Amino acid sequence: MPNTHLNFVHRVLEVKGERHKFTPKSTIITEYDAPVDTWYYRHNSSDTIPYSVLMEIALQPCGFLSAYLGTTLLYPNESLYFRNLDGQGRILKNVDIRGKTVTNTARLLSQSNIQGMIIQRFDFEMVYDGEPFYQGDASFGFFSSNALANQVGLDRGKDVRPWIETENSTGLPITTIDLRLQKNRAQFYHLNAEQPHYRASQHQLDLLNEVKLIEGGGRYQQGYIYAKKQVKPTDWYFKCHFHQDPVMPGSLGVEAILQAMQVYALQLDLGKHLKSPRFGQLLNHEIVWKYRGQIPQPNDQTEMYLEVHMSKVEIGNDKVTLIGDASLWKPNLRIYEVKNVAVCLLESTQQ
């Protein structure tokens, strides 16, 4: 299990299933007690659960159930690594879990063994105060170190470049924002007393160094974002991942994509008609992710870069909605794809 700031299972209430029998609908029920002053609320720009935290609370029990069933004993002479491959999730309602307990039920739906690899699929439902608030399903695989080292990404090893490098022939202006510069940090991260939540997330949720924006650009001509980050061996999440398995969690790649969309909204001042805007989650909307690679802890540093093709930018009287399709790369390899990734701007008092 992940540890410290990435540990989101505090107790197991019940397991239904027999060890060494991978029967569909084997089930685990877990609880997570959210601290009152937890880091991800403090570092977020508003009192909203970051999407990456929702993903981690939902998915970690799947790994626990898989381990309980004895999955790796199918290949007892192999050292296998557990990885999320894809999934989809839907937020049903906004909740504030600070100081509260979240219950999660995960069920094994299927399992297959393919050339020494084990693929399992689960569904999950998270409940707060007796009501479901996040549901979805996800698949996972167990892989050898050699298989992980030779992953070919989403494009079978082909170096598919971001749109900005290959297709941007429109002549539309590019806005470049270096988020490390003090003037830009003052613009995008500074706490304004009148609009305290109209800013980017900070500290452990600050996952980008630079953002390029093209208004009206991209595949759908609704807007385009390119962003990157220098990944360092000292980045906080490596020591919080599985024991002796330091990689960047895929959920934080999704969070970086959402941060890029937030910077886009801030730069264009899309919430200017709202009295006190805050970033929130889009309810009853399905986000779909796929991972075919990883960013391991580098010896020195490496680069992560991403793009978002905005498919919808809708400005309403009391809500701004941004939806897009995104990809994320490590050097020369596209490894994540996220469809229908979404963020919205709401009044701070609005649920």
Image (spheres, rainbow, N blue to C red):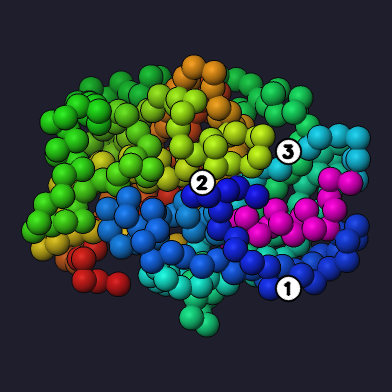
* CB within 8 Å, label 2 to label 1: no
| Residue closest to the eye, 232 or 257 | 232
Against 126, is 151 above or below? above
Report the Cα–Cα distance between label 2 and label 1.
26 Å
Check residue 160 for magenta coloring.
Answer: no
| Residue closest to the eye, 212 or 39 | 39
Q: Residues within 10 Å of mark 3 (few under 14, many from 20)?
A: some
Q: Which residue is mark 2?
A: 251
Residue 304 locus on image (x, y percent): 45, 27
Mark 2 or mark 3: whose residue is earlier in sequence: 3
Mark 1 or mark 3: whose residue is earlier in sequence: 1
What residue is rendered at 80% in x and 58% in y?
68
In the figure, is residue 120 to the left or right of 3?
right
Against 116, is 190 above or below? below
Q: Which residue is mark 3?
A: 81
Residue type at the position of mark 3: Tyr
In the figure, is residue 331 to the left or right of 188?
right
Looking at the image, can residue 25 be seen?
Answer: no
Nearer to us: label 2 or label 1 = 1
What residue is rendered at 29% in x and 39% in y?
223
Which region is colored magenta? 58-73
Give the structural element (helix, strand or loop) at label 1.
Answer: strand
What residue is rendered at 49% in x and 49% in y?
5
Check residue 67 for magenta coloring.
Answer: yes
Residue 155 locus on image (x, y percent): 61, 27
Instruction: Say which mark, if any, is on residue 14.
Output: 1
Mark 2 or mark 1: whose residue is earlier in sequence: 1
Nearer to us: label 2 or label 3 = 3
What residue is rendered at 55% in x and 66% in y?
32
